[in-house]
Structure formats: C-alpha cells, structure tokens
Image: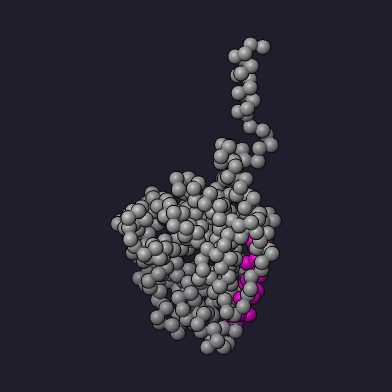
Amino acid sequence: MRPALALFLLLALCGSRSIADPTPGLRPPEAAQASAIDAAVARASVWLGAHPASITEHDVIGVVEEMMLYYALEMLAPDGPKSAAYRREIVSRHQALVGLNREAMRVSEKMRPHLQGIWGPLTYPPAAYIVSKLGLDASTYRAIVDDIIANHPLLYPPRGAMRTWIWVYMDRLGHPPVPSLAALLEQDTLSSESRTHTLRDRLLDPADATDPLVNIQAIYDITHEILALTDFGALPPSPELVAEQDQNAALLDAGIRWATANGATDILAEQIFAAHLLNLDDLPALPVAIRYILDQQQADGAFGVTNPGRQEGRRHGVLTCLLALESAAAARRF
C-alpha cells in the first residue's frame, strides 16, 4: 500500500465515530462534558436519596420550594423512570403540605411568621396552581392564598421584589391584576432592562461597586419572571419573552458570566435553567458556567451550601445545581 493512501485511511479511521457513541454529533470536548454531566446528575440523585428532606412546620416555605424545584425537574426529564421519580417527590411534598397548611390555617398565630412574610405570596400562588394542574387537592393552598388576599394588605397587591412572578400565578388562579397583567408586564424588570440595559451594564463592568446582593435580587426578579411566564417549561416562551429574545440573551449571558465569576452558584443555576426555557442553550457563557458547577460537586455528590439563608442549605444546593445540569442535558437531547 502506498504511504499516502495508508495515511489517508488511518486519518479516516481515527476521525470516524463509533455507532455506539452515546453522544452522537458532539465534538470530543462536548462529549466529555456530556458524560461528566450525566455522572454528576447520577451522584447528586444518589445524595438526595440518602439525605431526605426534614419536613416540619418550621420550614413550610422550604417544603413548598422543593415541590416547585421537583416540578421544574420533571419538566426537564423525558418520560420514563426519572420523570416518574420526580413526580413522586412532588406528591410526597404535597402530602406533607396538606397537613401543614391545615395547621397553619387552624392555628394561625403559630404559623404566622411563615405566611405573613414575603415568602407566603412568593410561594403559595405558584404552588396552588401547580398542585391544581397535576390533579391534586389544592384547597388548602388556595385557603392560604385567599387569606393573604383578604387579610394582608401589606403583601397583596404585590409590590416590589418579584411582583410579576406573583401576579402571573395569581392571574392563573383567577385573581387578575388591575389594570391588567399585560399592562404590568410592560413595566416589569425585563421590559425596563430591555430599554435601559442598566443591570447588564453593571454586570459587565468589572469596576462596578454595586452591592452584589442588589445584583442578585435583580437577577432573581428576571429569572422568576421567565419561570412564571413559561410555567417552569410547561409552556413555550410567551409573546412578551419572544419579543425581547435578543435583549434577554444578552442579559442572561452577562448574568451567567457575573454569577460564575462571583461564585453565586444558586442564581447561576437558576439563570442556566431560565436560558434553557428561552431556547438560549448556545449562550457563550454557558460552557464555562456548566464546568464551574461540575467543579463544585463534592465527593459525596452534594454541592455545598449554595444559599446559606436556607434551613436545608445542602439539599437546596443540590436541587438547584441538579436543575442546571438537567437543563444542560435536556439541551443536548433536542
């Protein structure tokens, strides 16, 4: 065989893909990251199974949040055992919450600190909607929502942080805002940012001296608006989101870069999920961000306490990082 022909055949063989390749169509570095994501998801799932949630009256809001996180994970999972496992976790949280909700309404003084603060309006409207949508009994959630509307004028109508998130789910529960949801969306954080680019400019400026907590709250406002308008991925992006797709892409790319650089893992994971909901899985900042989350995983499968304010900080950290990794895996499937 002539040397030139032999070299050509050798290069062709080395460059060909095996039909058994589990990640067809991916270049070698992407394939390696895909395998790392799958392994990290498996380790995180094992850790969650070995560290069940502590479901008590002292962390009602944490239980509601876990239910919503599992709902988001179910939206990402293809039909099969994993999707069924996430649904079981939702039902488990719901079953615990029914009793806790009844206790909250029966002895309101006991639960008042949990329900009067901002977390009540932030969590119970979406929880009531999700539970209803899944065909479960939402009466106790709706009782708390009705109590917030009737008895807490400082909390309802919503104002300030994440008000759009609250209004979207209140609207779905039959409590439309005044003047209208469409009018409120024209004044929300995303619409304002599309006109001014104030937050994006701050996030991209290395010399900016803004308190990081201010940036984090602004990013939470934006991600929660995206989550609400898409119902955690159950709905396609709304017309409002589609109209601002380019601005949203630039903003999320800046936010992901900022969160990665500042080690803000919780809000980083939420932005990765939000980008996936908007079909923005090719943002330039994502490969480094996913690598950062993979590097945060500890030997036992957990990711540390990504948000120290949570009572069950390690579980919350695992669930949010799992959400980011499952978003990356879902993007690979389509």
Q: Is residue 322 visible?
A: no
The quarter of the picture where residue 103 lies is bottom right
Q: Quadrant of the C terminus?
A: top right
**Residue at 63% across / 11% down in the picture?**
2
Q: Position of residue 108 (x, y in %)?
A: 53, 87
Asked if residue 213 lies left or right of residue 269, the reply is left
Q: Position of residue 109 (x, y in %)?
A: 52, 88
The chief SS type of the magenta part is helix
Q: Nearer the viewer, residue 248 or 6?
A: 6
Asked if residue 214 lies left or right of residue 123, the reply is left
Q: Is residue 78 magenta?
A: no
Q: Position of residue 333 (x, y in %)?
A: 59, 46
Q: Residue furthest left?
A: 196
Q: Quadrant of the N terminus?
A: top right
Q: Is residue 98 magenta?
A: yes
**Residue at 49% across / 51% down in the picture?**
289
**Residue at 40% across / 76% down in the picture?**
157
Q: Nearer the viewer, residue 204 or 91?
A: 204
Q: Is residue 116 above or below residue 202?
A: below
Q: Nearer the viewer, residue 78 or 161?
A: 161
Q: Position of residue 187 (x, y in %)?
A: 33, 64
Q: How many marks?
A: 0
Q: Is residue 163 visible?
A: yes
Asked if residue 118 lies left or right of residue 20, the reply is left
Q: Residue furthest top?
A: 2
**Residue at 55% across / 87% down in the picture?**
110
Q: How is the image coloured?
A: one colour
Q: Is residue 187 above or below residue 296?
A: below
Give the residues in magenta.
Answer: 84-102
